[in-house]
Image (cartoon, grey):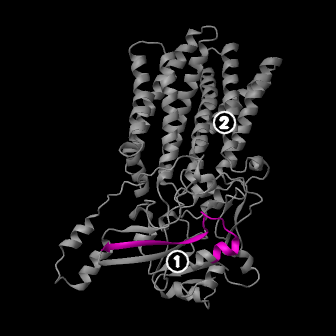
């Protein structure tokens, strides 16, 4: 048994009865929706066409929201319905980043994730979903797709159907008859927040304020006037009707009704914790690597590294908890883990890394070499994992194409070496001088910045596999983040430290701009992909 939906766009009249029925059935708060009818227009007056598309959870066979959820709040039932349990949700918002269809939201009343659950409570007693019952045109068809006698199965096999974003590999189970790319593909139209009934454009609850300001500027790099308009206007009155229709289909698509923008879901807390995590992991990796290469590890140097590592690891944990909309449930990540999620794996990596640092320090205090040795190797191995695990977490966020970059783990590893060496150079000013160790830190710092510049060039200049990833790269280099990127990341974060080193000035003065550059870079890399609309 596998439940799904067919949306028959030949019949939909855009009455929004499904939206109202869904809100009534589930007591959905104002400003968020489990299902809604997106409206787009094409053409230039008087040759225009309005399209209606019902948007909702696609109940994917390979649901990325289920894979990334750290506490099994989201799960796939035996009948194929993707359901959720609000009693387990910690409000991490990772499911919202993973969903390519923007189907999830944070309920402003409970601060937990919610979405269309196929009216599972009605299905269990033999009823159809509320939206199906209320639709006056029978434009929404539900049922068991595995049953060849069902209406939905016959429609899928007989009609020319399409799904949203098949390239994501999620195997969505919402099919559209007479679907249109202009309506179903977000990048073809621009979110403006200026259409009718857009007073909720800045969202409600979590999304209206603290997670990050919403920009009134365009979230895409799309041209304002597609070439189709000009072609249409130049078409003669005697042109065949079919040619006019084809041109109208391509002309000036625009949104006229849409759901409220959810804004930046992962804001400064996430970019902040990536920054502090880079310092914590970096000091341990630089220390351990230096020891393995034969550099002298004096007790003062080791204690400084352990203190910096534990201190910034604690700050990382605080920022992680702060970002949760249900911080009271943060221990669920460790006590009720869903092991496929890199949020869980990262949580355990951070915990073991912290324990390794403590064990190392305990061994030094008690003069027990076995404890120090275990702490040393634990810090080295789990420090590396802590440095890069967020790249794998971001790769699970399939809704954000730019985060799928294969260089992201290298990006975060290099940042950890820059941040760790910078912190140790700054801290070295307050302990006894160790010329051999300072020489090692200088080499790590210089070459890490050089590698970082190469990684930046590769990340932003390579041909990205999707339009959304390319749009994000353009947004960083030429769009709304360009000034912050060129001044903060390139000049302050990389070129200025290199210049200070090359002119022979103290490394101390190069570390501060390098750390500022890392902070700015992580802010851009976290925020920019979230500016693109997923519906």
Confirm whether the magenta stretch covers residue 240: no
Number of numbered discs visible in the structure rendering = 2
Residue 43: x and y, percent? Answer: 31, 73
Task: Find the magenta span and give its range.
Answer: 21-44
Q: Give the residue displayed 52% in from the left and 40% down from the top.
A: 523
Mark 1 neighbour density, 10 Å: few (under 14) some (14–19) many (20 or more): many
Left or right? Give the position of 328 relative to 57: right
> What residue is at 58 percent from the left and 26 percent from the top?
420
Q: Is residue 29 a member of the stretch shown in magenta? A: yes
Residue 5, picture quadrant: bottom right
- Residue 261 image point, x, y percent: 52, 58
Classed neighbour count for the residue bearing mark 2: other residues with Cα under 10 Å, few (<14), some (14–19), many (≥20): many
Of the image marks 2 and 1, the number of the one nearer the N terminus: 1
Q: What is the distance, in whole Å, between disc 2 and disc 1 at their CAs?
A: 42 Å
The residue at the point 76 percent across, 27 percent down is 358
Residue found at the far bottom of this picture: 149
Q: In this orientation, which residue lies closer to the viewer: 69 or 447?
A: 69
Quarter holding residue 242? bottom left
- In the structure shown, which secondary structural element does the residue marked by tag 2 occupy? helix
131 vs 333, left or right, is left
Q: Relative to 49, is 54 on the left or the right? A: right
Q: Which mark is residue 316?
A: 2
Q: Residue furthest right?
A: 366
In the image, residue 160 sits, relative to residue 436, either above or below, namely below
Q: Position of residue 392 (x, y in %)?
A: 58, 48
Vertical order, 246 against 150 (above or below): above
Which of the image's four quarters has the N terminus? Answer: bottom right
Please name whichever residue, 431 or 218, is drawn nearer the observer in this view of the structure: 218
Question: Pointer 1: what residue?
Answer: 175
Asked if residue 8 can be seen in this view, the reply is yes
């Amino acid at each position: 048994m596998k439940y799904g939906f067919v949306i028959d766009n030949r019949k939909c009249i855009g009455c929004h009865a499904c939206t109202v029925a869904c809100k009534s059935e589930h007591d959905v708060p104002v400003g968020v929706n489990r299902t809604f009818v997106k409206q787009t227009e094409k053409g230039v007056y008087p040759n225009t066409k309005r399209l209606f598309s019902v948007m909702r959870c696609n109940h994917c066979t390979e649901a990325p929201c289920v894979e990334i959820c750290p506490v099994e709040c989201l799960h796939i039932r035996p009948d194929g319905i993707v359901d959720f349990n609000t009693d387990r949700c910690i409000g991490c918002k990772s499911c919202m980043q993973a969903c390519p269809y923007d189907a999830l939201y944070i309920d402003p009343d409970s601060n937990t994730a919610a979405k269309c659950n196929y009216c599972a409570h009605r299905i269990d007693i033999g009823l159809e979903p509320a939206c199906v019952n209320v639709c006056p045109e029978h434009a929404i068809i539900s049922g068991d797709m595995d049953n060849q006698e069902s209406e939905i199965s016959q429609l899928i096999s007989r009609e020319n159907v399409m799904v949203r974003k098949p390239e994501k590999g999620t195997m969505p189970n919402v099919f559209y008859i007479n679907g249109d790319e202009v309506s179903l593909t977000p990048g073809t139209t621009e979110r403006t927040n200026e259409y009718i009934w857009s007073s909720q454009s800045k969202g409600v609850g979590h999304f209206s304020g603290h997670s990050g300001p919403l920009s009134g500027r365009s979230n895409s790099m799309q041209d304002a006037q597609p070439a189709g308009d000009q072609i249409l206007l130049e078409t003669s009155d005697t042109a065949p009707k079919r040619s006019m229709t084809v041109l109208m289909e391509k002309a000036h698509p625009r949104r006229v009704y849409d759901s409220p923008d959810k804004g930046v879901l992962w804001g400064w807390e996430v970019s902040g914790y990536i920054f502090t995590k880079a310092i914590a992991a970096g000091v341990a990796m630089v220390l351990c690597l230096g020891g393995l290469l034969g550099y002298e590890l004096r007790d003062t140097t080791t204690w400084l590294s352990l203190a910096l590592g534990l201190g910034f690891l604690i700050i990382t944990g605080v920022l992680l908890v702060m970002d949760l909309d249900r911080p009271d449930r943060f221990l669920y990540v460790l006590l009720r883990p869903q092991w496929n999620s890199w949020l869980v794996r990262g949580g355990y990596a951070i915990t073991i890394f912290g324990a390794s640092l403590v064990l190392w320090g305990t061994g030094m205090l008690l003069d027990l070499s076995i404890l120090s040795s275990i702490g040393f190797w634990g810090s080295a191995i789990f420090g590396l994992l802590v440095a890069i695990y967020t790249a794998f977490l971001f790769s699970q966020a399939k809704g954000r194409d730019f985060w799928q970059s294969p260089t992201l783990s290298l990006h975060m590893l290099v940042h950890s070496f820059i941040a760790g060496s910078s912190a140790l150079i700054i801290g070295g000013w307050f302990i006894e001088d160790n010329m051999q160790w300072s020489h090692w830190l200088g080499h790590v710092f210089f070459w890490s910045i050089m590698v970082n510049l190469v990684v930046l060039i590769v990340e932003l200049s390579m041909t990205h596999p999707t339009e959304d990833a390319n749009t994000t790269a353009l947004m960083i280099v030429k769009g709304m983040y360009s000034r912050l990127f060129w001044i903060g990341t390139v000049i302050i974060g990389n070129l200025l430290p290199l210049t200070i080193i090359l002119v022979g000035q103290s490394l101390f003065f190069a570390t501060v701009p390098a750390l500022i550059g890392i902070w700015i870079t992580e802010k851009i890399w976290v925020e920019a992909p979230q500016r693109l609309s997923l519906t």
